[in-house]
Image: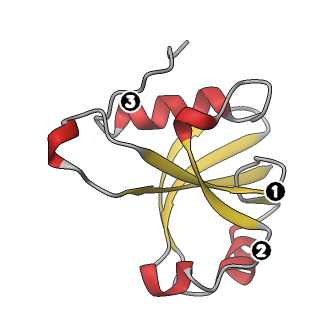
Amino acid sequence: MIHKLIIGKVNFDPTLGKRQHVQVLLDSDNKLPSANSLVALKKEFGQNLDIGKIFYENKSEKFYFAGIPKELQKHLSDKWSFIFVENLTPEKCIDYKIILKIIKKLGYKSTQKIA
């Protein structure tokens, strides 16, 4: 079973309403943080990684809401960066549909169509 984290970031702008510019943490290949265990993910991101509820699961993957304190975001390796969701496409990001679903679940609207 592969465990994947959805770590989002929103710099809230009240003038945008529900159409905020949401960012998600991805690696250099535009993949969500993933590992064979939650322990391995804690090793990668540190013990202050806040892993929440399972958002979605299928036969081979579990997707969790997660958060990293702002002070630790500055110390992530160069492998990781926050990418604006509007810059992603299904061709660029294997987890594109899941990312759009989470944005919808969190109450934000996306300019992309959610399948």
- Left or right: 64, with 19 as reference point: right
Which residue was labeled with disc 1? Answer: 28
- Location of residue 60 in the rendering, given as x and y in whole percent from the top left corner: 79, 38
Q: Amino acid at mark 2?
A: Asp
- Location of residue 9 in the rendering, given as x and y in whole percent from the top left corner: 43, 58
- Location of residue 115 in the rendering, given as x and y in whole percent from the top left corner: 55, 12
- Asked which secondary structure carries label 1, the reply is loop
- Tell me which label, 3 or 2, sits earlier in the chain: 2
Q: Amino acid at mark 3?
A: Lys
- Tell me which label, 2 or 1, sits earlier in the chain: 1
Which residue was labeled with disc 3? Answer: 104
- Left or right: 26, with 72 as reference point: right
Q: Quadrant of residue 36?
A: bottom right
Judging depth in this view, the residue of 50 and 70 nearest the camera is: 70
Q: Are marks 2 and 1 in contact (CB under 8 Å)?
A: yes
The disc at residue 78 is: 2
Cα distance, mark 2 to mark 1?
Answer: 8 Å
- Left or right: 25, with 92 as reference point: left
* Colour scheme: secondary structure
- Asked which secondary structure carries label 3, the reply is helix
